[in-house]
Image (cartoon, rainbow, N blue to C red):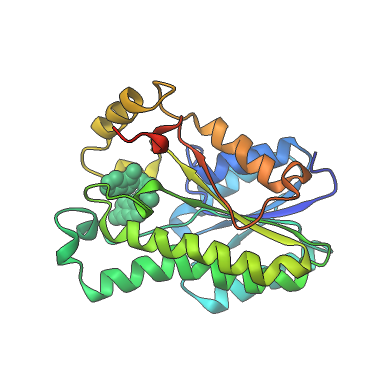
Amino acid sequence: MLKGKVGIVFGIANKRSIAWSIAEAWHRAGAQLALTYQGDRLRDNVAELAHGLGGNIPIYPCDVTKDEEIDNVFKSLGNDFDCLDLVLHSVAFAPKEALEGQFLETEREAFRVAHDVSAYSLVAISRAALPLMTNGGSIVTMTYYGSEKVVPHYNVMGVAKASLEATVRYLSYDLGSRKVRVNAISAGPVKTLAARGIRGFSSMLTYHSEHAPLKRNVEIEEIGNTGLYLGSDLSAGVTGEIIFVDCGYNIMGM
Ligand code: 0WE
């Protein structure tokens, strides 16, 4: 379904990452991929995953808070491939203290970092990707329900995800004339490395599975498959959208 397409993936930490599940789905559908990693700490992980896909999949370092590193990624990509069709942005961060206690206590710097890493980076990456997306394409990002309803302790991440979702709409308006679509997947909670650092995450998973219409939690492959749908022409008429992959949790009023 993605034969001949080229994709770049931001946000793989390990094999449990949502970014990895979408990368795998894109790869299985025939896309050629490049992966990025954030910091030397994650380099070996990402190199090993790239190697596992066979062929020679380039990996590039990228801290999304550095314009220069983003520029270098797309310079390298331009050397390694003729053009670009798919971009996955699966990156978020807020300082740990900001995800505990009250939102009221959020410090200026924590607010800034959360928005820089989790929302502005989509603008920076999209702008840098665009010169290579000469045949149109699809940009996909990850969001969460805490952007629209209060999820205790999600705090500044919820505010940053609200910004990210609005960013998806404004980008999709700007990029529509170039046939580039921009969408977000709003995934139910998944036990990834990012979730491991969060107190009470296991009881959240239980609560979610008991209250979602499907009476279970989302499987990471289901998020991968929605990423495949958004990357492929199956979703050719879809842009600026937030698609829930949460076993229906978000529709409930009680
Ligand atoms: O977007 C997220 C979490 C992203 C995240 C995770 C961490 C953990 C380690 C961002 N920043 C950090 N900073 C760290 O230091 N999710 C959708 C998962 C999540 O996180 C929560 C949730 C859910 C769901 C935090 C509190 C309450 C619910």
- View extreme (top): residue: 215
Vertical position of residue 52 compared to residue 97: above or below: above
Q: Nearer the viewer, residue 79 or 209?
A: 209
Residue at x 59%, y 37% (from the top left corner) = 224
- View extreme (front): residue: 253
Picture quarter with the N terminus:
top right
Q: Nearer the viewer, residue 83 or 187?
A: 187
Residue at x 43%, y 62% (from the top left corner) = 118
Vertical position of residue 27 compared to residue 43: above or below: above
Residue at x 49%, y 29% (from the top left corner) = 219
Picture quarter with the C terminus:
top left
Give residue 99's quadrant in the image.
Answer: bottom left
**Res 194 visible:** no
Vertical position of residue 91 compared to residue 231: above or below: below
Left-right relation of 54 to 62: right
All told, the count of numbered labels is 0
Residue at x 78%, y 45% (from the top left corner) = 233
Q: Which of 243 and 98 is in front in this view?
A: 243
- View extreme (bottom): residue: 68
Q: Nearer the viewer, residue 30 or 152?
A: 152
Q: Position of residue 110 (x, y in %)?
A: 27, 69
Left-right relation of 67 to 157: right
Q: Position of residue 141 (x, y in %)?
A: 55, 54
Give residue 217's quadrant in the image.
Answer: top left
